[in-house]
Image: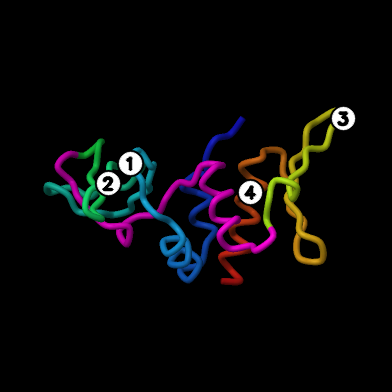
Amino acid sequence: MKQRITPEQLQELTDEQKQHLRNCWEPRTFDVTYIENMNFEDRTLTGYDTVFVSAKKLHSINYRPLEYTKEDCLPLLNTGQMIEVLQNKIVYFNMTNMFAGTGDKICWGIFKPKTFDMRADELCDALWHTVKRVLYNV
């Protein structure tokens, strides 16, 4: 089962959606982030990073002693973090909005009547489609 979104999925967002995502995200220790073209010790970093948080600064675990803020990166959200975003942005979002179809192949879906119906083979992808839609409408 897929646990988190990919850097490629982050690229599906508009600049405005990326800023909305940063605003929704409260960094926590061991969050996985994606940094792009960051200058550090005479090199340019692009890729995954894991952070610990102290005094609103993100301290890199992978590239010590790198420090940055959430404006410098985007979170690679896991399924729990996406559910938190949806609970904070959709007044009536709860676990009853999710379903798993059975048959030859499991299909996950997230829906809100008359608003959206997002389906995917992976729960993570169905949640991501919903988060993108919510970030567009913020």
Amino acid under disc 1: Thr
Residue 65, x across and y down, in percent: 14, 42
List the single residue furthest toward the right: 103
Q: Are marks 1 and 2 in contact (CB under 8 Å)?
A: yes
Residue 61 or residue 53, whichever sits in front: 53
Mark 4: secondary structure: helix
Per the model, the C-alpha gap separating discs 1 and 2 is: 5 Å
Q: Are marks 3 and 1 in contact (CB under 8 Å)?
A: no
Amino acid under disc 3: Gly
Q: Nearer the viewer, mark 2 or mark 4?
A: 2
Residue 104, x across and y down, in percent: 85, 28
In this view, 116 is above or below 108: below
Give the number of the disc on residue 53.
2
Residue hosting label 4: 127
Circle nearer the N terminus (1, 2): 1
Q: Quadrant of residue 93?
A: bottom right
In this view, 18 is above or below 121: below
Residue 38 or residue 109, whichever sits in front: 109
List the single residue furthest toward the left: 41
Q: Are marks 2 and 3 in contact (CB under 8 Å)?
A: no
Mark 3: secondary structure: loop
Task: Identify the magenta region.
Answer: 64-92
Per the model, the C-alpha gap separating discs 2 and 3 is: 43 Å
Amino acid under disc 4: Leu
Residue hosting label 3: 103
| Residue drawn at point x = 22 percent, y = 45 percent | 59
Residue 130, x across and y down, in percent: 65, 56
